[in-house]
Structure formats: C-alpha cells, structure tokens
Image: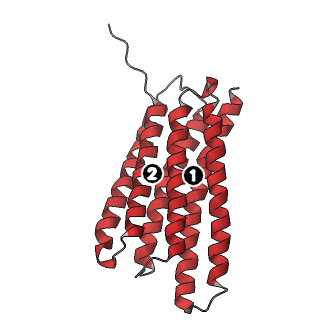
Amino acid sequence: MFKKKKYNYFQTFQLMTDCAHQAALELMRELKEYQPENLNAHLQTMHRYEKEADVRRHEIMKVLAKDGRPPMDREDIVALSNALDDVVDMVEDISIGFYIYNVQEIPVDALAYGKVVLKCCDAVQDMMLEFEKFTHNDNVMQSVKLVNRLESEGDVLFAKTTRDLFSQPMDAVDVIRWKSMFGRLEKACDACEEVSHLVESVVLKHS
C-alpha cells in the first residue's frame, strides 16, 4: 500500500508569494501605463491574485487542523500563512486606493515607491524558496536581511514623499489623496517585512 504523500506547506507558501509577485508586477504595469478608464480591468486582475492567495491560506488551515506532525510549530505556520496573505492584500489595497481616491494621474514619486514594493515582493519570493531548507541554509537569513533593507528604503521614501506633500504648493485634495496612497505603499512594504521577521524567528528557533 502506498503511503499518502505528506503535504508540503513550503510549496504552498511559495505559491502564495507567487501571487504577491504577480500582483506587484501588475501594480507596476498599472503605475507605468495608468489610464483611469482601464482601472476596472486592473482591479479585477488584482482581485484574482488576492483570491488565489486566500484560497491557499484556507487550504493550509484545513490541512493543519488534521496534521499530527507539521514541519514546524502550528502557530508559526498560521502566522506565516496569514502574513503572506496580508502581503497580497496590501498590494491589492494600493490599487483599490486608485479607485477610492479617484486618481487621475501617477506622480513620479509613486512610480518610484511602486518599484520598491516590487523589489520587496521579489525578495520575499526568493526568501520563501530558500525557507524550505531553513534548518541548514544560510541563504534564507541573507534573504531576510535583504527584505529588511528594502523595507528600510521604503521608510526613507515614505518620509521624503510625505514631507514633499507638505513642503510644496499643492491642492488640499491632492495632499489628502497622496498622503493616503503613500501610506498604502508603505503598508505593502511593512507586510513584506513582517514575513521576514516570522521567517527569522522560525530559523532562530530551530538553529
């Protein structure tokens, strides 16, 4: 009789990071080629990535409930799956902001911030590829450091872009609009850093 194949949590984590990566790529495409009349199609695409990540998260929860010997502590698996789902949610939330705040054009600073978000999501994707071998793989900690460094770049950019909003003559509505939008971009970077913190915690726990 064949043994039932063990569920691969790491592979599902990687599929969730793929969703984040694809969502960030779609966000960058929209930032570069922004046209308000195409926003609905863009939002539908982003929602597909968000929905796929959510399905993966529910899949992990369903398996974990019956798994007698998961590869790491249950609370770590739950926290990681939630954090990876949050990354996709936060990237989608940027696009939702385009609609909520009736964005008509994209400033240069927003495009620069979008690039940082994409780099963060790419780094998380690489980190989770290494994570499967976390008990004997120094590369995962290098990936953790990269995610943290990129998030710090986002912090610097957030401070600069927010200061610029209040330092230059600008319509009050635009100040409100872009203060919120830059905040959404910042939260996407923060969500990536949260994943890196959880990965680091698991690695240290098992080292």
Image point (42%, 62%), residue name: 28
- Mark 1 and mark 2 in contact? Answer it, CB < 8 Å: yes
Q: Quadrant of the N terminus?
A: top left
Q: Which mark is residue 94?
A: none
Please state which of residues 134 and 83 is positioned toward the viewer in this rendering.
134
Residue 199 in sight in this render = no
Most foreground residue, 56 or 13: 13
Identify the residue at image location x=66%, y=51%: 149
Position of 156 compared to 58: left or right?
A: right
| 98 and 137: which is toward the camera | 137
Amino acid tagged 2: Ala
Above or below residue 192? Residue 80 is above
Position of 86 compared to 44: left or right?
right
CA gap between label 1 and label 2 equals 10 Å
Q: Is the C terminus in the top left, top right, bottom left or bottom right quadrant?
A: top right
Report the residue that reaches farthest toward the top: 1
Query: Label 1 belongs to which residue?
Result: 192
Which residue is located at x 64 percent, y 80 percent?
164
Disc 1 crowd, CA 10 A, few/some/many (<14, 14-19, 20+): many
Q: Position of residue 158 (x, y in %)?
A: 63, 69
Q: Earlier in the sequence, mark 1 or mark 2?
A: 2
Q: Is residue 158 left or right of residue 14?
A: right
Residue topped by disc 2: 20
